């Protein structure tokens, strides 16, 4: 998975000129291949979230929600073609998708469960679409290396948390939501993320090396909280994993959960420091 991701991001950056320019060249359309790649896990994540909701008797209004999720998640992509403000596009997309949800509810289910179904559909749209948009935004605005830095720092924090938790974990971080997570694991997440962040900063010059550990620590903490957020959804639906799509990990949501809430914070961090 790592080799494929790095290869695709580098090839994508070579195609649109991001890797050959000193700064991201916005005269070319950015990240077309990556856009196609990101849509797949986000869409599959939407299906998994729909199944979790079904376990609680809620119906995500698909295909409207699925289409809206993709439209919102690709917020940074379409304004490269359409003469529309990047801040206006997602608002328009959300407005039209919300209206379409009510139409689908009316014709498919009538009044039954309107509040619950529209509510869980909006949650899916925001949780995966809005948060996922910032993952793509990092790539478009800050380039391939910043994107890879974000992915590697967050996922290395997951590895650090798992390793330190297995070796040294004694004090529960959130026993009601995720009994296996520990404060020792969180410390390992911070250490691993800070180290990887410093390596990327030193090799690619994305940010000052002394700032990198702060970035890593922030990503580690928020990534673990983001993971806990998805765990809350699974526990409420009485599911251990969101699915079994990815052997050794669980579902797509289990793979991308730590990235979701970390993405907007990383985007702001890159804009302020990189």
Image (cartoon, grey):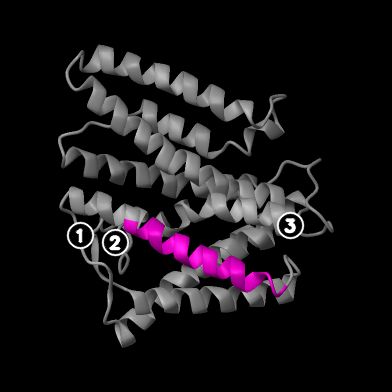
Mark 1–mark 2 contact, CB under 8 Å?
yes
Give the distance between the C-alpha atoms of the residues marked 2 and 3, in whole angstroms.
33 Å
Q: Does 210 lie within the magenta span?
A: yes
Work out how far the residue at label 1 is from the one at label 3, CA to CA, in angstroms: 40 Å
Q: Nearer the viewer, residue 87 or 73?
A: 87
User: In x, y percent, where is residue 153?
Assistant: 54, 68
Q: x and y percent of residue 221 in the render?
A: 46, 65
**Total marks drawn?**
3
Q: Residues within 10 Å of mark 3 (few under 14, many from 20)?
A: some
Using residue 76 as the reference point, say whether residue 130 is left or right of it.
left
Measured as percent of width and height from the top left, residue 77 is found at 63, 38
Q: Main secondary structure of the magenta part?
A: helix
> What span is colored magenta in the figure?
209-228
Disc 1 versus disc 3: nearer the observer: 1
Q: Is residue 228 left or right of residue 32?
A: left
Quarter of the image for residue 30 reads top right
Q: Nearer the viewer, residue 61 or 269?
A: 269
Q: Which mark is residue 250?
A: 2
Q: Residues within 10 Å of mark 1 (few under 14, many from 20)?
A: few
In which quarter of the view is residue 255 placed?
A: bottom left
Determine if residue 1 is in view.
no
Q: Percent from the top left, x then y, of residue 155? A: 47, 67
Under circle 2, the secondary element is loop
At 41% from the left edge and 16% from the top edge, which residue is drawn? 99
Q: Which residue is mark 3?
A: 14
Foreground label between 1 and 2: 1
Residue 240's mark? 1
Q: Is residue 207 left or right of residue 41?
A: right
Q: CA distance from mark 1 to mark 2?
A: 9 Å
Q: Is residue 225 magenta?
A: yes
Q: Secondary structure at mark 1?
A: loop
């Amino acid at each position: 998975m790592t080799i494929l991701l790095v290869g695709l991001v580098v090839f994508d950056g070579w195609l649109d000129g991001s890797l050959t320019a000193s700064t991201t060249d916005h005269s070319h359309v950015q990240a077309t291949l990556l856009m196609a790649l990101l849509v797949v896990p986000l869409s599959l994540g939407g299906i998994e979230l729909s199944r979790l909701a079904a376990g609680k008797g809620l119906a995500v209004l698909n295909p409207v929600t699925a289409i809206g999720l993709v439209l919102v998640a690709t917020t940074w992509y379409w304004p490269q073609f359409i003469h529309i403000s990047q801040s206006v596009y997602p608002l328009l997309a959300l407005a039209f998708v919300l209206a379409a949800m009510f139409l689908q509810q009316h014709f498919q289910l009538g009044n039954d469960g309107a509040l619950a179904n529209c509510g869980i559909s909006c949650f899916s749209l925001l949780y995966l679409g809005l948060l996922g948009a910032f993952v793509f935004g990092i790539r478009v605005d800050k380039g391939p290396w910043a994107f890879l830095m974000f992915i590697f720092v967050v996922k290395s924090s997951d590895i650090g948390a798992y390793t330190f938790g297995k070796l040294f974990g004694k004090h529960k971080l959130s026993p009601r939501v995720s009994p296996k997570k520990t404060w020792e694991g969180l410390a390992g997440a911070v250490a691993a993320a800070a180290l990887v962040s410093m390596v990327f900063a030193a090799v690619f010059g994305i940010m000052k090396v002394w700032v990198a550990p702060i970035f890593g620590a922030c990503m580690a903490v928020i990534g673990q909280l983001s993971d806990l957020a998805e765990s809350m959804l699974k526990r409420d639906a009485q599911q251990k994993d969101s699915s079994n799509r990815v052997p050794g990990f669980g579902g797509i949501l289990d793979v991308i959960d730590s990235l979701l809430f970390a993405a907007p914070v990383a985007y702001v961090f890159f804009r302020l420091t990189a």
